[in-house]
Image (tube, rainbow, N blue to C red):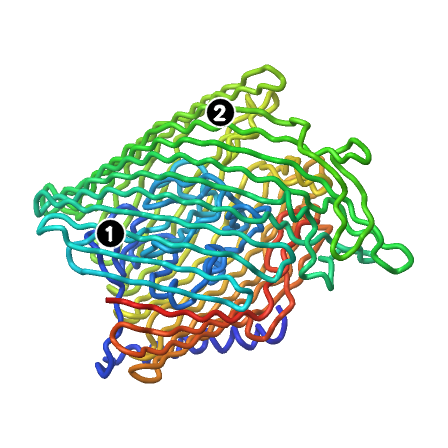
Amino acid sequence: MQALPKIILTSLLSTSILSSSVCAHETSTEEKIEEIEVTGKQVSIDKMNAVKTPTPLVDIPQSLSIIDSRQIADQAFSNFGDILRYTPGLSISQGEGHRDAIIIRGIQTTADFFLDGFRDDVQYYRPLYNLEQIEVLRGSNALLFGRGGGGGIINRVTKKANLETDIIGLNASLDSFGAYALTFDYNTEINDNAAFRLNAFYEDMNNHRDFFDGERFAINPKFLFKPSEETDIHLSYEYIDDDRTVDRGVPSQNVDNGPDVPLKGYQETFFGSPEENFTTLQAHILRARVDHEFSEVLRGNIGVQYADYDKWYQNLYSSEEVVVTNGAFSEVELDGYSDATDRENTLVQANLIGEPEFAGFKHTFLLGLEFGSQKTSNSRRDNVFAANGDDQLVIPFSDPLVIPDFSYVSTSRNRSSDVSFLSVYFQDQIDVTDWFKVIGGLRFDRFDIDVTDVIVNSSFSRTDEEVTPRFGAIVKPMENLSAYYSYSETFLPRSGDQFLTLNLDSESTRPQSFKNSELGLKWDMNDRFSLTAALFDLDRESYTSVDPDDASQLIIIEGSVTQGFEIQATGYLSDKWYISVGYSYIDGKVARVDDSGNSGNKTRQTPENMLSIWNRVTLSDAFSIGFGATYQDSYFVREDNSVEVPSYFRVDAAAYYTLNETTRLQLNVENLFDEDYYPDAHSNDNISTGKPLNVKLGIQLSF
């Protein structure tokens, strides 16, 4: 790690440890601290929805993070990925410029996203406008979520209609690039037993990249019906429309004796077609959930989600490193394709949660059932250049590029898949003594997939039945301090997380497996400040990765091992100072001999050291400031380790001024010191360039 981040890390950890003496005292009440608003029984500042049981965070034997609505509003990021950079153990992948893609503990995924506990696995950019909190669970855990989630999962918790508060909120923002956004939040009580909430937003996009623009909007009406004191019924409909430029960044440039590095000096240059690089998404998501308390020790819920996604993207992109002739950049190769996906998800979940006394022990059990279907059709057409009749073409290097004539005419994929699944799971946490708890459970999954390939006129099908365990032990020498060990497993069918990789070769291959062992510590220093740490070992069997020689193709990597540790401190150091600090060390390596020659190499896009910090300090009744920073080590883009993205250290800042009871002004500065950096990548020649200094001015109105 570089010297500066070392100094910062040492200082921050020292501050966090020393803060225990500060936090141990009763804090003053000179200023009222804004709390997370609790709506119904869904959101709690000391519990996590994703674990499905009313378990305090200190008693959960798993590393996790919660980003609440206050931090989401304070940081004012437009992108889901930007706010996730402020959590340990997690980095962002580029997603080819048209989707969210994350890497948790060295495991990349485009599908391990959940929305109020329901799978949300289509490839798109997820908005932030209607979120109560973001939950990050690290480590494999099929028991709660089923297939996938090898490194962990992300669960978005949306704002709910509630009977407690009438809300009218309107936010507007404008940044240095001319991008602007409007959000609206309205909640009202219809009568004593019903409430209505409406969240909506519109965003006009722009940034530092040539030719980039876009717009998206969404609307999310919600109802709460409360037929009795014991029963809540939540209904929700969300529509999302996203239309933007697909930007896959810059290619690499050669370095004698390697590894190669991202192209320097062309942070704004667009390596694609200004007219033909775009993506569109229309999503309709309907949800219904019923929560019922049968008694003081027994409750249940059942939920149904239907979602229809229509996704289309097409792009040209650089497919090889830039050619250098006589010391100057002379040529670059382009490739491209058009891709369309339609998906319908129908999901049903039911959970029974009990907290009985049995055989002299207190139990917290979870019994669950999940079933559903997912129907997907996907087609891809390669581009063909008029100059050579091929999908790849070397063109002269220039800024901007002169794009030759081409069209998307050659169909390279036309597939449909029909997935059905059934899951049953049981988990029990037993309080053996006041200071010792054990947790154990099993999940059975049946996963059926039928794939039809129109081009080759063939069909593939496979049925997987998997039983995955979870086990943990928790020692609590004090009520607010716990040490734990946990072991968990998950699996991913050979069809992949987007159901595209099942073929004759993989049809008879068992699912990919993940095994996670974890040793951790959690300490609630008081009711407003906590410190957590975890050591982990994650073993993954063979998996697919983007071919470094052809970003549109996949290759097989014969397994990896990821080891590391994470530490985070979150809460109030005083009434006026909130802080969130996270650090992770991750060592990910290709662990098994394979034909690609990658054995012993670093896993893709896995920085060894990552550090983040966010502060919010109240200086007066009207004025507050925010300060944050993220550091990320250098990393290799792919398992061939031929291109290395350099480390970076980025600083963000904010200021907040309350004019009166209804109006607040907000100023956010991203990349305060105008750092040149490369935040993420997809393949060796698709590497994003970071935004230069960006100032965003916002106004928040509430009535």
Q: Place residue 558 in its image quadrant.
A: top right
Vertical arrangement, residue 272 with respect to residue 464, above or below: below
Q: Quadrant of the C terminus?
A: bottom left
> Which residue ends up furthest to the right in the rendered image?
326
Q: Residues within 10 Å of mark 1 (few under 14, many from 20)?
A: many
Residue 654 rendering spot, x and y as whole percentages: 44, 74
Viewer-nearest residue: 503 or 95: 95
Q: Which residue is mark 2?
A: 417
> Which residue ends up furthest to the top in the rendered image?
457
Q: Residue at x 18, y 47 (%)?
A: 224
Q: Which residue is mark 1?
A: 197
Q: Quadrant of the N terminus?
A: bottom right
Viewer-nearest residue: 223 or 617: 223
Q: Residues within 10 Å of mark 2 (few under 14, many from 20)?
A: many
In the rendered view, does 119 fall on the left or right side of 538?
Answer: left
Vertical arrangement, residue 508 with respect to residue 155, above or below: above
Residue 124 rendering spot, x and y as whole percentages: 49, 44
Tell me the kind of residue under disc 2: Ser
Residue 361 rendering spot, x and y as whole percentages: 17, 47
Examine the rendering and report whether any part of residue 600 can be seen: no
Q: Residue at x 76, y 49 (%)?
A: 402
Residue 702 rendering spot, x and y as whole percentages: 27, 67
Q: Residue at x 58, y 49 (%)?
A: 245
